[in-house]
Image (tube, rainbow, N blue to C red):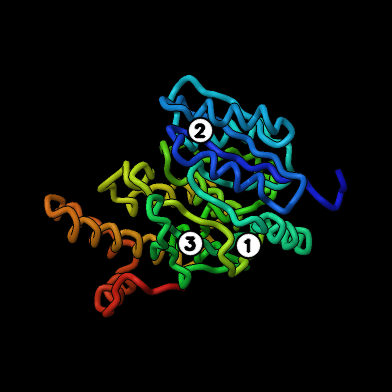
Amino acid sequence: MSANRPLVSVIMPTFNAAPFVAESIESVLAQTYDPIELLVVDDASEDDTPQIVEEYAQRYPEQVRFRRGTERFGPCRRRNDALDFAGGSLIGWLDHDDLWSPEKTAKEVVVLQARPDVGLVYSGYEAFDSDTREPIPWRDRDSEAEGDVLVPLFVRGCFVGSLTALFRREVLTRRHLRLRETDFSFGDDYYLWLVLSLDWKVARIDEVLAYYRRHGGNESERLGETNFHLLRIALLQEFLEEFPEAVPRLGKWRRRGLAGHYLRAGHYELTRIPSRRAQGAASITRAALQAPGYTLRRLSASDGMREQP
């Protein structure tokens, strides 16, 4: 293996993905970049997913490695399991239903090799309907950022599509990290990007290099009416407690960022869950406690939820 061509390890948790996991695996095998390996850990699937993945592992033993779990722990835990037997210095992130364009890895490796200060590179992506293959508006390109992204990530949320990301293993080893497992299937990517931004720059390739499949089995569909804004606030507070050095870096945007997320949480509950109007009002009150002047300006603005640093 040439020192100029680092091994890329792709982590993929699977669960009941029989209708589409083969296409996702094929999109890794079709990468123009070499060397690349795919580490698949199954989360106690009840369909033919393990058999499908095992066939690939047998056909491509140098590229596809597979482990099968017997208990349901969730994708956050299974990504850590995949990392445990990944050998690459660069890590790719692909779920069992999403797809990559063939040149994705090669283009992202070029950026990481050229810029040692960059810990993560990501790209644009498109969403598509799994049944019709028709595109679905999804990506919020205007929220994306690069360079020093700590403040934008904290204030705007997770704008790095995990299916597009390639990052250095050193991001994990430098701070002795494992992926966050606090929630069953939420936040491990976002939390890692926040921690990464304490030490590294982030680069963006403004091309569509990945494809997000929408279908009835998506985790977002399973979670239904969950208020993700409240989950995000809990994650951000956890991040601040674990990494207090982020506080001076964030400056005024720490309180403003939390206020903005409380406003979104309150708006979600007031407009989508009528039975939780009291909780929605409480979230808006919490926003005002965090940053009163900022909250008032946001509530007065015509697009109330959109101010960005």
Crowding near the residue tagged with mark 2, few <14, some 14–19, many ≥20 C-alpha atoms within 10 Å:
many
Residue carrying label 2 = 77
Separation of disc 2 and disc 3 at Cα?
26 Å
Q: Residue at x 70, y 61 (%)?
A: 107
Quick one: label 1 or label 2, which is nearer the N terminus? Answer: 2
Q: Is residue 238 above or below residue 268?
A: above
Mark 1 closeness class: few <14, some 14–19, many ≥20 residues within 10 Å: many
Q: Residue at x 67, y 56 (%)?
A: 119
Q: Is residue 12 left or right of residue 274?
A: right
Mark 3 lies on residue: 126
Tell me, for residue 202, which label it has, or none: 1
What's the residue type where badge 3 is placed? Glu
Q: Nearer the viewer, residue 187 or 14?
A: 14
Q: Are marks 3 and 1 in contact (CB under 8 Å)?
A: no
Q: CA distance from mark 1 to mark 2?
A: 25 Å
Extreme-top residue of the structure:
70
Name the secondary structure under disc 2: helix
Callout 1: helix, strand or loop? strand
Tell me the kind of residue under disc 2: Arg
Q: Quadrant of residue 104?
A: bottom right
Task: Specify which label sits upstream in the sequence, 3 or 1.
Answer: 3
**In this view, 2 is above or below 39:** below
74 to 306, vertically: above or below: above
Q: CA distance from mark 3 to mark 1?
A: 20 Å
- Asked if residue 13 is positioned above or below residue 289 in the image, the reply reads above
Amino acid type at mark 1: Val
Q: Are marks 1 and 2 in contact (CB under 8 Å)?
A: no
Decide if residue 152 is in sight here.
yes
- Do the residues under discs 2 and 3 have CB atoms within 8 angstroms? no
